[in-house]
Image (cartoon, rainbow, N blue to C red):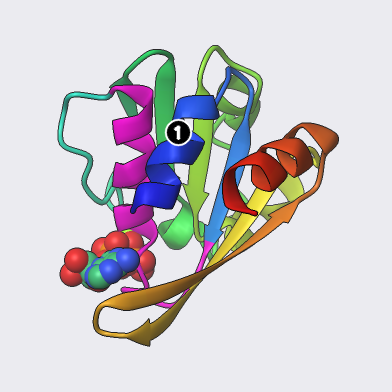
Amino acid sequence: MEAARKLGERLEAGDVLTLEGDLGSGKTTFTKGLGKGLGVKRTINSPTFTIVKEYMGRIPLFHMDAYRLEESEEDIGFDEYFHGDGATVVEWAQYIEEYLPEARLDITITYVNETVRSIELKPNVERFEKICEELFV
Ligand SMILES: Nc1ncnc2c1ncn2[C@@H]1O[C@H](COP(=O)(O)OP(=O)(O)OP(=O)(O)O)[C@@H](O)[C@H]1O
Ligand SMILES: [Mg+2]
């Protein structure tokens, strides 16, 4: 998760990342890498039963898991996170699509084999286009 760590080093307040990928593809593992890059000391684990967890690093990291929101229209105050003082990473973002800001980095993780994952980055804003070019070309 070297790529995730490097990306974490570049994150700023107000950044929003989405993580798409099948069950067990590695979304939470990627988030752990982001945390490392952000200097988060606590162990990051799956937020499935809490929806949002906050970790303190160089800036706060909001780790969201929208999996349980599939059937609900609930707005849990997303904007407070997306436009807050930290960076937000969302697992299962497709379930809260209508609440997501347009300026974000969409990440798709695909299982290749037991030890390999492929990561596709889709920046929707210039800031992330630059970061992706600098980090991953
Ligand atoms: N890049 C990787 N290389 C090798 N193994 C990995 C990688 N990423 C994740 N794994 C392994 O895959 C398993 C599932 O990972 P993880 O919990 O991150 O998936 P997830 O996408 O968050 O799952 P869920 O959909 O349940 O939230 C873990 O056992 C983890 O160690
Ligand atoms: Mg997970």
Outermost bottom residue:
113
Choose top left, top right, bottom left or bottom right for residue 78.
top right
Residue 106 lies in the magenta stretch: no
Give the crowd class for mark 1: few <14, some 14-19, many >=20 residues within 10 Å.
many
Residue 86 picture location, percent across and down: 51, 19
Asked whether, in this view, residue 79 is left or right of residue 101, the answer is left
Image quadrant occupied by the C terminus: bottom right
* Ligand 1 shown in quarter: bottom left
Q: Would residue 30 be visible to someone looking at this image?
A: yes
Asked whether, in this view, residue 4 is left or right of residue 104, the answer is left
Choose top left, top right, bottom left or bottom right for residue 130.
top right
Secondary structure beneath disc 1?
helix
| Residue at image coords 43%, 30% | 62
Outermost front residue:
137
In the image, residue 125 above or below residue 92: above
| Residue at image coords 72%, 39% | 128
Residue 127 picture location, percent across and down: 77, 31
| Residue at image coords 67%, 37% | 131
Q: Nearer the viewer, residue 72 or 129?
A: 129
What are the residue bounds of the magenta stretch? 20-39
Q: As shown in the figure, which amino acid type bears the numbered disc 1?
A: Gly
Asked whether, in this view, residue 128 is left or right of residue 31, the answer is right
| Residue at image coords 71%, 46% | 133
Q: Would residue 52 be visible to someone looking at this image?
A: no
Residue 8 picture location, percent across and down: 45, 33
State the residue position of label 1. Answer: 8
